[in-house]
Image (cartoon, rainbow, N blue to C red):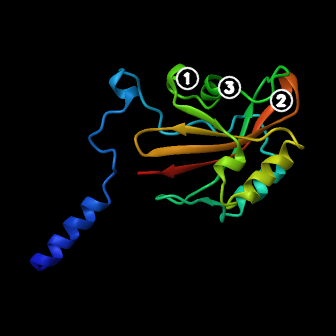
Amino acid sequence: MASSSEQDYMAFLDKANEDPSKGVASAAKTQGQGVKKKFRTTQEGVEVPEAIRRVCGKGDAFYVSEADEPFEAVALGWDEAGRGLPDEEEFAGLIEHWDPKNADVEIMDPVDWDRNGQYGEIVDAVREAGQGNDVRVYRVARDGVRIEYWVVTTEGKGEGAKLVGAKALAVES
C-alpha cells in the first residue's frame, strides 16, 4: 500500500500533467462547430519536396517550446495565380481551419520568428524547395496555449503551384 506522501505526490503529478485547456471552451465549440483535431498539412497528389522530406524525416528537427514538437512536412495545392503566398484567410482555408474568416493567423518574417538562428536548417530547406521564392512563417493559434508555426513557400506558378514547407506545434503558456 502506498504511503500518504506517495499518494499526494502521485496526485500532484496527475494534476501537473493535465491538459492546460481542460474545462476551457474553445471559440469553435462555443459557436456550435466541431473542432478539428489537426490542420491539413498534406494533400493527396501533392508531393513533398525532397529538401523538406530530408529535414523533416531525420527526426531531430524540433520546435523548442513547452512541448518540443517535431516539424512535419507541408505540401498543399495552391493556385497562387501570380500572387505568391496566401494571405491570412486564404492560408486558414488551405489548412482547413474550422473558421477561416475568424482564424487567428499572423504572418511573420522568418528572421523575426527565428531570432536566435535555431531553425536555419528548416528555413534553408524550405527556401531550397521553393527555389528561392519568398519564405514566410504563419503563426496559427489553436487555443489558449497551443500555437502552430508554419514555415512555407511556393513551388511552381499558377494552377500547378504548391505551398510547401514545415510546421510545428508550440505550447506557450
Q: Secondary structure at mark 1?
A: helix
Please state if 140 lies on the left or on the right of 31 as rendered. Answer: right
Rendered position, 6 above or below 172: below
Q: Nearer the viewer, residue 108 or 4?
A: 108
Determine crowd level at label 2: few under 14, some 14-19, many 20+ residues with C-alpha closer than 10 A.
some
Quick one: label 2 or label 3, which is nearer the N terminus?
A: 3
Q: Are marks 1 and 3 in contact (CB under 8 Å)?
A: no
Where residue 100 is drawn, which disc sits there?
1
Quick one: label 2 or label 1, which is nearer the N terminus?
A: 1
Q: Position of residue 159 (x, y in %)?
A: 84, 22
Q: Position of residue 64 (x, y in %)?
A: 56, 60
- Amino acid type, callout 1: Pro
Rendered position, 160 above or below 155: above
Q: Nearer the viewer, residue 46 or 162?
A: 162
| Residue at image coords 70%, 60% | 117
Determine crowd level at label 3: few under 14, some 14-19, many 20+ residues with C-alpha closer than 10 A.
few
Please state if 51 lies on the left or on the right of 60 as rendered. Answer: right
Q: Can you identify the residue that label 3 sits on?
A: 87
- Amino acid type, callout 2: Ala
